[in-house]
Image (spheres, rainbow, N blue to C red):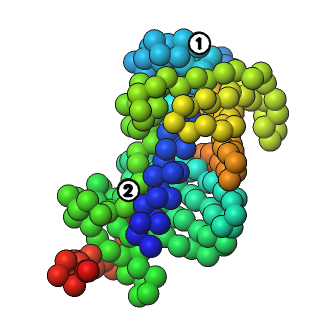
Amino acid sequence: MQDLLKNKLVWLVAAVVVVGGGILLATKDGGETKLNINKELQSKCMTQVNDELFCKFAGVFGNVSTFKVTATSTSEQGTSSFEISTDAKDNNQMVVKQNNQEQANIVVYNGVTYLKDYTDGQWFKYAADDPSRPEVSDLKKEFAKGDFKSDSGQKIEYVKMGTEACGNLQCYKYQVKDPDTPGDNFLWFDTKDYLLRRITLKDQSSSTDMNVNYGAVNISQPSPTKDVPSLDTDTIQ
């Protein structure tokens, strides 16, 4: 279960980090929206991507706060869904479901990782240096540190495909060409506030649809907790 969970986490984080995601911090002045842009990230984007529109979106992402990403993936194994939430204090929570049954619930609270044990409803509490702890990445930090390159250091291409409706909004649509994850990958951010609205990923074996929602996110410290059982290597043959 732990290996399966870790693989799912790695896949989802990689998918989302490729395209980024977040919430706009904006103010109104004279009827126009002022975007709170991270100039450093915008400049880094211009160096690597050289697309003013996309890099404006990236700069907005650099100053995000709370957001929630919901994703549904369909493959031969069935349907999986994921939900990643981030609050204003950079706490994170991820819930994984398979065929509508909850399979994992991970919380990173004040830097400490917790994993729900469904046998008794308690939470495993992982030491900060435990290499087996499940990970829910800080998507904003992952996006910012990546220099808009793939995990192997190759350039990611962001190709503008035009505009189209996304819900009741108009959105810019971009194709994301990552050499490490070939397939039909797209993202949409709206034309007014530059908020990420949707991500789709498709390859020969699966398809995934992600949506980003905005508003207050409250993540509480899990309780009750218990220690993670240690594995006796002498009993493992």
How many discs mark residues in the rendered view? 2
Is residue 197 visible to the viewer in this orientation of the structure?
no
Residue 174 appears at what percent x and percent y? 68, 27
Q: Nearer the viewer, residue 223 or 77?
A: 77
- CA gap, disc 2 and disc 1: 33 Å
Seen in the picture, residue 206 relative to 191 is either above or below; the reply is below
Closer to the camera in the image, 36 or 16 = 16
Q: Is residue 125 above or below residue 170?
A: below
Residue occupying the point 59% across, 13% down: 51
Which residue was labeled with disc 1?
52
Q: Is residue 199 left or right of residue 143?
A: right
Element type at mark 1? helix
Q: Position of residue 113 (x, y in %)?
A: 32, 62
Which disc number belongs to residue 135?
2
**From what the image shows, is residue 92 above or below residue 58?**
below
Point out the image quarter for the N terminus: bottom left
Check whether the beta carbons of the residues at disc 2 and disc 1 lie within 8 A of each other: no
What residue type is disc 1 on?
A: Glu
Identified at 69% across, 45% down, the residue is: 202
For residue 216, side relative to residue 143 (left or right): right
Q: Secondary structure at mark 2?
A: loop
Question: Does 168 sit left or right of 73 as displayed?
Answer: right
Quarter occupied by the C terminus? bottom left
Q: Which mark is residue 69?
A: none
